[in-house]
Amino acid sequence: MHEPNAKITDEQREAALALLRSFDSQVMREAAEGGAKTGFAQEIGPIAFENVFARLWTRPGLDKRARSLLTLGILIGLRSEDELQIHMMIALANGLTMQELEEVIYHASGYAGFPAANSARRAAVTAFRKEGLID
């Protein structure tokens, strides 16, 4: 069991770093540089790294593909377009296909609504264009 307030271990840190390296994309690089460029709320990146990637994404019980599907569903429901751009690329790195990502958006329309699904579509198109995956 993980202690909620314990510092992350070296093993968790290394696993999270390896995970992030596997997600290498233009969208991820832009997200990583965002806080450092502005000087405002610079700690959000390290907080996300420790609390999301080192603590959650490295846990046993769900593989990366399942975590991507779950994350996309949550972000679509929240209409978090910036995060969706990042996680669409992560989902591709985790083995989901473009067709599966389309199906995630279609499926979410029935549960989160058409406005949320359309926001997800816009986020995906933006991310895929940045990566040169679509015109």
Image (cartoon, grey):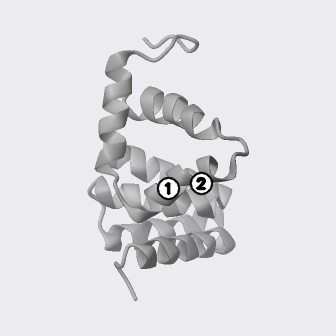
Quadrant of the rendering where the C terminus is positioned: bottom left
> How far across and down, in percent of the image, does residue 38 sit?
68, 52
Question: Residue 33: x and y, percent?
Answer: 53, 52
Label 1 CA crowd tier, 10 Å (few <14, some 14–19, many 20+): many
Q: Nearer the viewer, residue 66 or 43?
A: 43
Q: State whether residue 63 appears in this view.
A: no
Q: Which mark is residue 12?
A: none
Q: Earlier in the sequence, mark 2 or mark 1?
A: 2
On screen, residue 130 above or below 66: below
Front residue of 74 and 43: 43
Q: Is residue 6 left or right of residue 60?
A: right
Task: Measuring from the top left, give residue 17's x and y in whole percent.
Answer: 35, 35
Q: Considering only vertical position in the picture, is 3 above or below 55?
A: above
Residue farthest to the bottom, as pictured: 135
Callouts 2 and 1 close, C-beta under 8 Å? no
| Residue at mark 1 | 72
- Does dot 2 land on a helix, a strand or a loop? helix
- Give the number of marks: 2
What distance separates the C-alpha of mark 2 from that of mark 1? 21 Å
Residue 69 appears anywhere in the view: yes
Which residue of the protein is positioned furthest toward the right in this rendering? Answer: 40
Q: Provide the secondary structure element on which disc 1 rests.
A: helix
Note whether 53 is above or below 113 in the view shown: above
Seen as rendered, the residue at the extreme left is 95
Bin the neighbour count of mark 2 within 10 Å (Cα to Cα): few under 14, some 14-19, many 20 and up: some
Look at label 2 and name its amino acid: Gly
Instruction: Say which residue label 2 marks.
Output: 34
Location of residue 34 in the rendering, given as x and y in whole percent from the top left corner: 59, 54
What is the three-letter code of the residue carrying label 1? Answer: Leu
The label nearer to you, 2 versus 1, is 2
Q: Which residue sits at x=41%, y=50%?
A: 68
- Seen at 59% across and 71% down, the residue is 117
